[in-house]
Image: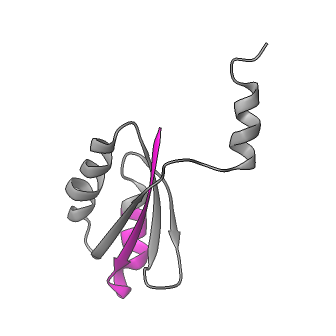
Amino acid sequence: MITAIIQIRCSRELIPQTAEAIAELPGIAEVYSVSGDYDLMAILKVKSFDDIAGSVTEQMVKIPGIVRTNTISAFRVYSKTDKEAGFTLGGA
């Protein structure tokens, strides 16, 4: 599974509606309202890099309120939960 973090700048008056619409897209695990240069952060989990392109450039562009996106592809995960789960996979 490939994870991408998508930073989203929105029209201020449409942030809640935009966040809800993004959350409904296939592959979106979570959407966060954040402070800083962007208004929202979405966590996308897909099977291929082509799926990232489809989600961001084909589906998200249709959502009213999105002004700009910046997509960050994750290479590895460093998480206590994931490390613990890895020890139980395929083990005897």
Identify the residue at horizontal 25%, vertical 72% (top origin): 64
Check the image and report above or below for 38 versus 26.
below
**Magenta stretch, residue numbers:** 1-21
Image quarter hosting the C terminus: top right
Q: Position of residue 44 (x, y in %)?
A: 44, 52
Identify the residue at horizontal 69%, vertical 17% (top origin): 90
Does residue 36 appear to the left or right of 90 in the view shown? left
Identify the residue at horizontal 36%, vertical 70% (top origin): 18
Q: Nearer the viewer, residue 26 or 89?
A: 89
Check the image and report above or below for 79 versus 85.
below
Q: Position of residue 68 (x, y in %)?
A: 28, 75
Q: Nearer the viewer, residue 88 or 16?
A: 88
Q: Which residue reaches farthest front?
A: 75
Identify the residue at horizontal 77%, vertical 37% (top origin): 84
Q: Which residue reaches farthest top?
A: 92
Check the image and report above or below for 76 versus 57.
above
Check the image and report above or below for 57 versus 37.
above
Q: Position of residue 4 (x, y in %)?
A: 43, 54
Count the marks: how many? Answer: 0
Q: Nearer the viewer, residue 36 or 20?
A: 36
**Which image quarter: residue 50?**
top left
Taking the magenta stretch, the answer to whether it contains residue 20 is yes
**Which image quarter: residue 6?**
bottom left
* Protein image colouring: one colour
**Which image quarter: residue 38?**
bottom left
